[in-house]
Image (spheres, rainbow, N blue to C red):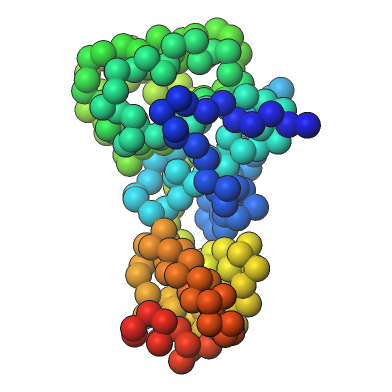
Amino acid sequence: MSRAPAQLPLGVGLRDDATFANFHPGPNATLVDRLVHQLDDDGEPFLYVWGAAGTGRSHLLQAACHAASDRDGRALYLPLAELGHFPPLMLEEIERLDLVAIDDLERVVGRKRWEEALFHAFNRLRDAGKRLVIAAEAPPRQLPVKLPDLASRLTWGMTFHLQGLDDPGRLAALQLRAKGRGMQLPDEVARYILHRGPRRLDALFETLAVLDRASLSAQRKLTIPFVKQSLGW
């Protein structure tokens, strides 16, 4: 039986739907493949992922933690957007884990105590032969890192630009997410939601969640008139 990913006492967990199977890679297939195989013996020890908000950075980091758990590994997800206002005590002894996923790195860049803690954590993970994946909104060299040694460490591994999806890709992602929810989403309804709904994928998926709840409550199939009625479009 696989062990659950390590959890912080602060209550930060993983979304159940944040899996690789529930992510449409589009132009990011190489990145997803590297993440899927990061815990392999020949996997990449350090991956740095950057991209705009809404492209799926957090989803992929949580998916990596789920995948590590499925392989009986221990993983920890650290979203610094939620944790960055705390002292970096959660980085202590993380080399005992198999995979550490640090999200929203930009939230602590420039802060001496955090930068030093990250630098030392990086070294301990490397020396222990463990895996690290970091996500941020900008590539390593564009972050205003003050500690030169940390800036150097951030460029050691493989860096990937997480690219947004075009409209066919967004359609495929929407239908994949609907399938994961057990929803029947006809092509014409999906295209209507894409045309009328928000551009960001995370907001689009929330729209889908609203429709899922409305459909279950009304015991109605998803049609364009029902979508208009449910969302006030």
In the rendered image, the vertical position of residue 46 relative to residue 221, given as above or below: above
Residue at the spot 26% in from the left edge and 27% down from the top edge: 85
Q: Quadrant of residue 196?
A: bottom left
Question: Could you say where residue 44 lies in the image, as x and y percent from the top left?
Answer: 59, 27
User: Relative to 171, is 1 on the left or the right?
Assistant: right
Left or right of 163? Residue 26 is right
| Residue 216 horizontal/vertical position (percent) | 56, 75
Residue lying farthest front? 217
Q: Quadrant of the N terminus?
A: top right
Question: Residue 132, relative to residue 190: is it above or below?
Answer: above
Task: Identify the residue at image location x=29%, y=23%.
Answer: 86
Q: Give the number of marks.
A: 0
Report the front residue among 3 and 141. 3
Outermost right residue: 1
Image quarter of the C terminus:
bottom left
Q: Residue furthest bottom?
A: 225
Across and down, in percent, residue 223 comes to 53, 88
Q: Residue at x 53, y 71 (%)?
A: 212
Whether residue 166 is visible: no
